[in-house]
Amino acid sequence: MKRFVLVFVLVLMVASPASAALEDLWGDVHPLLHNAVAALDKRVDVPDSDWNPLKDDKKSLDRQINKLLDECIEVLGISEMSETKLAIQDLQDDSRRCSEKIAELKTARLAAPRTVEKWEVWKKDAASIDAEIADLEQRRKDNEQRVEKLIDQLLEDMRRIGMKVDREQVETLVYSVTGADDIQLMSVFNNVKLITVELQRLTSEANENIEMAKRYYGMHTLLLRILLNLYQHYEDRITDVYMVRIGEIIKKQQDLIKKTQSMIETEPAKYTMIYKTNLIAQGLTVRTARLYGDYLEKNRRRIAKLKAGVQDEYNVALNTYETVQGAHSLISLMRNANNMLDRLSELQTPELIVFQNTEMKNEFKKLTGMINNGN
């Protein structure tokens, strides 16, 4: 497992965990960035579009660059945080499968015989079904305990990179539909900061070779573009997927509330308390869904603010890359970009919810499943 840290020694000659981590990261990202910069070089001298599909134009080169940058995102998104979140997701998925199987077995249990003949290998008796259910319930319980430990680990990972969060906020991240995206954003951002400092050093060392200096600065420029692409993807998923699904859930529950209220007035009085209990549950779902929507919208605005800060830096970096005449200005601008990344670090922390009660937290988890499944 690759271990990426945020503090490292710039002298790569010295063996240390930090320098080894940077060498691994740089070794994986460098060839992708090298090829992307080559495409960026060609982009300056080609037309916006060309009728000949065999010739390069700006659109075709942008597609090449974005494909390479998407591969970079996969590499830069690897971190202790992302691997911990992935382990949590695997356990949650296994628990969900256990629950589905338990429900299936309980249905089969209703018609199961007390005993079966040895030759009836396709049948299960009640005792064997009960044993299977007990095993699955224990497995689900073990998964929950392991998830709790991994949440503690994720909290430690996040605090290690300077994020000011408590355990309940980390739980929000774990159970949110954007949790994996948030972890990826934080991992990529912090690894981009790592490489930016290293590129600054390499650019400075290449002061006598303007072509090398320009190439390193081109890599820095494309790292900023990686952040822009990632932020745009995050915004689009919230706007076009999650908020739409939340709206559908709220509409469905509101219709159900009207139906329930009507049935309270028209159905026999002996069912009134059941309908009122259902009405309370339906209202909780609507309130939690609205809270969920507010939570996602706050995070969308946070990312939009991050993107605006990076966009300005990317524009000047690209313009400088295309027109640079000397290495000194590159080094100066790269230092400014590194300071910008430091200023934006706090904005990487997602807007996280502190739940008012256990019922709302459980409803939040349930809604996450509904949103993910498109229900």
Image (tube, helix red, strand yellow):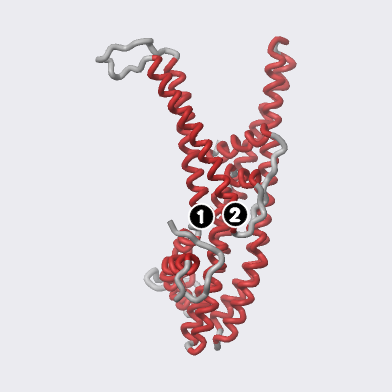
The image quadrant that residue 315 belongs to is bottom right
Left or right: where 151 falls relative to 274:
left
Q: Position of residue 266 (x, y in %)?
A: 72, 14
Seen in the picture, residue 191 relative to 116 is either above or below; the reply is below
Check the image and name the residue furthest to the left: 119
Residue at 57 percent across and 36 percent down: it is 370
Seen in the picture, residue 24 relative to 365 is either above or below; the reply is below
Residue at 50 percent across and 81 percent down: it is 214
- Residue at the spot of label 2: 158
Q: Secondary structure at mark 2?
A: helix
Q: Position of residue 311 (x, y in %)?
A: 62, 68
Check the image and name the residue furthest to the front: 15
Q: Position of residue 360 (x, y in %)?
A: 67, 35
Residue at 73 percent across and 22 percent down: it is 261
Left or right: where 17 falls relative to 112:
right
Q: Nearer the viewer, residue 260 or 52?
A: 260
Kindly check if marks 2 and 1 are in contact, taking CB atoms under 8 A apart as contact. no
Q: Quadrant of the N terminus?
A: bottom left
Q: Position of residue 109 (x, y in %)?
A: 43, 16
Seen in the picture, residue 302 relative to 315 is either above or below; the reply is above
Disc 2 residue type? Met
Residue at 50 percent across and 66 percent down: it is 18
- Residue at the spot of label 1: 80
Q: Earlier in the sequence, mark 2 or mark 1?
A: 1
Classify 10 Å Cα crowding around label 2: few (below 14), some (14-19), many (20 and above): many
The image quadrant that residue 314 belongs to is bottom right
